[in-house]
Amino acid sequence: PKTAIIVGAGIAGLATAIRLSAKGYQVNVFEANDYPGGKLHSKTVEGYRFDLGPSLFTMPWLITELFEIHGKNPTDYFNYYKKDVICNYFWEDGKTFSAKADINQFAKEASISFNEKEETIKRFLSDNRKKYDLTHSIFLEKSLHRTSTYLSKDTLKALFRIGGMGINNTLNKSNERYFSNPKLVQLFNRYATYNGSSPYKTPGIMSMIPHLEMELGTYFPKGGMHEITKALFQLAQDIGVVFHFKQPVKQILVKGKKAVGITTDGGDFTGDLVVSNMDVYPTYRKLLANHRQPEKTLKQERSSSALIFYWGINKSFPQLDLHNILFSNDYPTEFKYIFDKKTLYHDATVYINITSKEQEQDAPKGSENWFVMINAPGNYGQDWDTLVTVARQHIISKINRVLNTDIASLIATEFVLDPKGIESATSSYRGALYGAASNSKFAAFLRHPNFSNHIKNLYFCGGSVHPGGGIPLCLLSAKIVHDLVPEM
Ligand code: FAD
């Protein structure tokens, strides 16, 4: 059979390996680390289990499909359930709101809590659904960069209607058109961070993101987020994909404008095609250094990064759920610090994820495993040690004020991940969580396509290329690569 080489065993690399294998390719995956999953990894310390990267799981059918195309029963590998509570929100003035997954319940409770009309909330949600329905098949499920995409009926329909969808507005302005309560606007502005962007810059069309979470649902994988990696890795092995760990790829070999293989310290490996799941920036700068560089794409602004404290907490907090947000008092300034000043804001929005709320075995009895994250600028060589020390103090004070506790005295174990650490663990340029930012209306068109325009048989998948970052889009990138790769 024909052979495919994949550089990187992140979620997108795993999904691409599984899909190309279904197409009949013999697949070899070369991974720099000694584990699969990239950002989707976990670590257990003194009885506390932590998912290190993603914590929010949407669109699970993009995972189960990977088992079905190989005739396997997904539940033999992977199980999950839908959450009734989407997120618990907290503000400094004592206000709280628990967002429910049931749309009618959400609209009713939000209407009372934020003093907005129930019909307006429902109209907002149904407008978001329309935006998603009209655009997802062209922006997310196809290669935007093939002329055939532009000639399809879906595209024409979407382009005609795009004027009314807030593409010329920011997400914040678009949300303000529906709601007058600043707290409800802030709640919906937060969805810009799902692709690492600023609500004051990203276009209003991004209000389709709450549709993904609120109407399509938010889920929890049994065993934690890391089960996604484990299940896909197991499937890949079962269908004959070959993995080479601790094998950083040094170069993509090109002959006569065709990708023909890769080089690692172990030697050269040849294949009929090469797919890079490595961030597109270092793929060009390091693995294709002697080839033409798509400068415009590579110079695109990067999405935000994150600072995460993984804390074993010696107490349980009944007011918290799996996902919790402690909002900043000044959201616009927080985003100015992240994207313009490129430093940390003293009153950052704090996200607390606690998987032991779903499965007690993730923490010792009576304790909880806290993943405490703030959005952060990318790594531009800032003095992270100092920034982290200062931020830790601010985060602790904020948690104490909002939850009325003394959290520092309850921390039983601790480790930290900052943007520099995220960059070095997976080679994502500047430690960006989601590749390029979507801080402009053109961002979707500037992302690197899933194929090379200049080198035949070279493809790209993962969060730094089309259609974007986050688990669902990474899985869709694998699907697009599958569709672009020639039949055997
Ligand atoms: P990666 O996971 O970065 O994998 C790339 C792989 O390639 C790595 O294993 C790396 O070691 C390997 N590699 C790189 N260079 C080489 C080389 N030269 N040779 C061999 N191997 C190489 N997404 C969500 O959907 N929901 C969330 O809640 C969420 N939260 C997040 C929170 C954090 C803290 C982080 C870091 C990310 C979060 N994301 C979230 C984003 C999500 O994790 C990513 O979009 C996704 O995991 C990226 O997958 P990937 O396959 O593109 O890349």
Image (cartoon, helix red, strand yellow):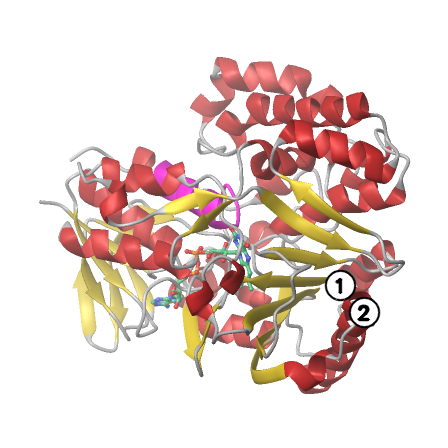
Mark count: 2
Find the magenta span and give its range. Answer: 466-481
Residue 289 picture quarter: bottom left
In the image, 370 versus 379, the foreground residue is 370
Point out the image quarter for the C terminus.
top left
Residue type beneath disc 2: Tyr
Q: Residue at x 75, y 68 (%)?
A: 342
The relative height of residue 84 versus residue 93 in the rendered view (above or below) is: above
| Residue for badge 1 | 338
Look at the image and say whether residue 376 sits in the magenta stretch. Answer: no
Residue 2 picture quarter: top left
Q: Disc 1 and disc 2: Cα gap in Å? A: 8 Å
Whether the residue under disc 2 has CB within 8 Å of ligand 1: no
The relative height of residue 59 versus residue 54 in the rendered view (above or below) is: above
- Circles 1 and 2, Cβ within 8 Å, touching? The answer is yes
Residue 168 picture quarter: top right
Can I make out residue 311 in this image? yes
Residue type beneath disc 1: Ile
SS for callout 2: loop
Give me the disc on residue 345.
2
Q: Residue at x 83, y 29 (%)?
A: 178
Q: Residue at x 56, y 41 (%)?
A: 84
Tell me residue 126's x, y (percent): 67, 22
SS for callout 1: helix
Q: Residue at x 64, y 33 (%)?
A: 208
Report the predominant secondary structure element of the magenta stretch: helix
Can I make out residue 455 in this image? no
Tell me residue 101's x, y (percent): 60, 37
Front: mark 1 or 2:
2
